Image (cartoon, rainbow, N blue to C red):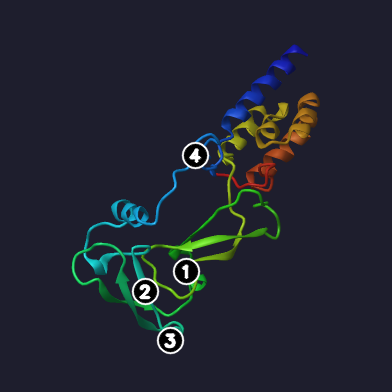
Amino acid sequence: MYLKLTFFIIVISISTCSHNGEFHNEAVPSSGAEKPKDSPTNVPQRQAEHSCPYIRCDQLNYPCISCSMNETCVYGDQTIAKCKALHRCIGNENFERPFICQYCYQTELWEHTCVQKANCDSVASPRASYRTNCTVHDDVICLGRRTFLRKLTCNWTGGHRWSTAMLLSVTLGGFGADRFYLGYWQEGIGKLFSFGGLGVWTIIDFILISIQYLGPADGSLYI
């Protein structure tokens, strides 16, 4: 009995230390820290110093430039955008830049960055999806709003490794270590006190984990 309790405590410690998520929340400033207010005159200066490099004007990207485009262009064809540098740069501040006629929400996945969410089921069948905000890269010129909503397929991980789950299933599966690691606490306790269902449960879990049918309980993917 004491051996089981000691093993149960060790498995909980391993599972807690191993759970290292891929998505992290950004630090939120304390409520006591007051955010400095910018006057209309010093905002462009700060952007020029920190956001916009002092280079040739035709090499600048958003938000250091402002471009006007012909919205009647033919979709998919290459056309010309007339741009103007908003900050100090080298050369003529008015220039032209070629781009593909398309709206920002029609850009390819590699041309924009989306806010990833870790609150959906990545192992559901069919795969679950969610709507999130996406923003095109600074060097991409497109029509319409540069930030838009897009539907993405759930594809996130909570930090659980398939190799670790397999190792625990092979070595300590009879004591429920694999179930504890994946977050199935109730099944893990049942497996612990039944010695892996007298071996049958242990074999079944090993097969399910090996084909990745049995994944983390939080709905994430293995890494």
Whether label 1 touches label 4, CB < 8 Å: no
Q: Secondary structure at mark 1?
A: loop
Q: Which residue is mark 2?
A: 67
Q: Residue at x 36, y 65 (%)?
A: 139
Please name the residue shown 24% across and 62% down the image.
Answer: 88
Kind of residue at badge 3: Cys
Report the quarter where the C terminus lies. Answer: top right
Q: CA distance from mark 3 to mark 1?
A: 19 Å
Provide residue 116's location: percent of width, then percent of height.
56, 53
Q: Name which of mark 2 and mark 1 comes first in the sequence.
A: 2
Q: Nearer the viewer, residue 35 or 173?
A: 35
Q: Which residue is mark 3?
A: 73
Q: Nearer the viewer, mark 3 or mark 1?
A: 3
For disc 4, the neighbor class at 10 Å (few under 14, some 14 to 19, many from 20) is few
For label 3, the SS is loop
* Residue 109 percent location from the top left of the image: 48, 65
Q: Amino acid at mark 2?
A: Cys
Q: CA distance from mark 4 to mark 2?
A: 35 Å
- Label 1 to label 4: alpha-carbon separation: 39 Å
Q: Which residue is mark 1?
A: 108
Q: Amino acid at mark 1?
A: Glu
The residue that mark 4 highlights is 34
- State which quadrant residue 208 falls in: top right
Quadrant where the N terminus is found in the figure = top right
